[in-house]
Image: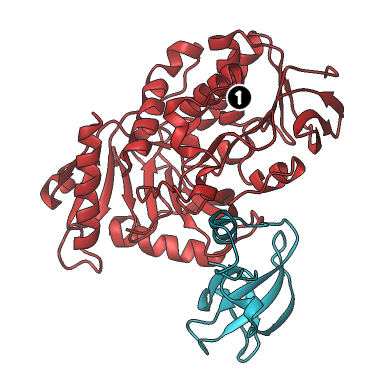
Chain colours: A cyan, B red
Amino acid sequence: MILLPCAWCGPRDATEFAHVGEASSRPDPAEVTPAQWRGYLYMRANPRGWTTETWYHRMGCRRFIRVERHTETNEVRSVSAAGGADLEPAR
Amino acid sequence: MKGSYDVVIVGGGVHGLAAAYYLATNHGITDVAVLDKGYIGSGGSGRNTAILRSNYLTPEGVRFYDRSVKLYQRLATDLDYNVMFSQRGHLTLAHSDASLRTMRWRAEVNKVEGVNSEVIGPAEIKRLAPFLDVSPAARYPILGALWHPPGGIIRHDAVVWGYARGASARGVHIHQNTEVTGIDVTGGRVRGVRTSNGDIATPVVLNATAGWATLISDMAGVTMPVMTSPLQAAVTEPVKPFLSTVIVSGTLHVYISQTDRGELVFGASVDPFTSYSMRGSLEFIEGLAGHVLELMPALTKVRLLRQWAGLCDMTPDFSPIMGRTPVDGFFVDVGWGTYGFKAGPVSGEAMAQCIASGETPGIIAAFGLERFGEGALVGEKGAAAVGH
């Protein structure tokens, strides 16, 4: 499998993490139509290439990280602490 | 390759070839091209573990997969090709009260839909599969199982080749090593397909790919609720026949069957993150071996021959995406997750009807792309990727 360099713990086996999914912005529930909300819930870019996603270090520091990963090679380009509203779990 | 076809099918697996076969056989539409970027059956159709069953949980799912099993039962006759379907029975083990409850639920739904399934206890399980450890001392004791006699295994390559031969004999063109690089859409209508071997003008394109559902649909501007993950499988050296049923454990994430040659075929759940990589992993082999030995301790000396991975297009409700899309002439038969191979014949039959008539057949009405916008998800918890 792959090693993920956790922003707090350093390189760890990916099995320690939960893959939360593509990082996406949650629309304002008061502003969107039901169809737009369901688009946010279900639709995915699912690219073959670089993607920005959220992982949760469930068997480590139990914090969320933002990861840039290539979905074909599983190469990790960057890792940072997740925190902003744009890093809310995608599902 | 001609410059134009009435129908272009992307993906030369069991779904695409079955759709071509039924377009020609049931509807007289033979000006059809099936394109594959590799060779036929090189994707999910050649990478699955060849298990057939219809013991799902939702009535929509049970009706659909039951139709597929019935088509598989007569497929060798229809295609005049030996597909080696062995209806040896299928056991889904329950290791907890919660999964036993789900098994009872599935059995009742199955019976209402006329599908043979029943819950059996450890003694009966031991009679069907003597090498299983059914003792209460096991780490995950076997409390019962869903016994599904119509389930079994088949030779998946033969299914692909049989459909390809049948379609080809009726005039369908099959183009291998032909990668689709673009889909031309103007005015909300499909106009043609661009490929590595030239352009094709066509009013109808069917996306029948597995692992590339998002990438092909993106070319037509159709967004998919799909996440792609690898699923790994492995096979052992051949041993004497000792296992006459298919064994599945959702708790241990493993399924086991023995081929006619004697090899044991093991499959697992999808890898726990999205990826287009088809490399196998050591974690998978370690976990798989441990789980298999939990179930059958006698297999400690058996050696693995090889492992591989296929790509699974997972949807939020573990059900496929079939039928029309917002782009006229662009049809999808995708989102096949971990259950695509067993659905090949019924999907081909239904998609051929959908394309020929322009109407969505009732048997796939619940599986339309529009359900995600409407919030009408199917919720198929009988799928192999769902931990029970």
Q: Mark 1 belongs to which amino acid?
A: Leu
Expressed as whole percent of the image width and height from the top left, the position of residue A45 reads: 68, 57
Farthest front residue in view: A31
Position of the C terminus of chain B by quadrant: bottom left
Of residues B187 and B68, which is closer to you in this image?
A: B187
Position of the N terminus of chain B by quadrant: top right
At a point 75% along the width and 30% down the height, the residue shown is B189
Expressed as whole percent of the image width and height from the top left, the position of residue B162 reads: 55, 19
Of residues B38 and B244, which is closer to you in this image?
A: B38
Residue at mark 1: chain: B
* Quadrant housing residue B184: top right
Is B206 situated left or right of B76 in this image?
A: right
Query: Is residue B4 positioned above or below B292 on the image?
Result: above
Is A35 situated left or right of B124 in this image?
A: right
* Quadrant housing residue B23: top right
At a point 31% along the width and 38% down the height, the residue shown is B59
Expressed as whole percent of the image width and height from the top left, the position of residue A16 reads: 51, 78
Is B289 situated left or right of A45 in this image?
A: left
Name the residue tied to disc 1.
B17
* Quadrant housing residue A8: bottom right
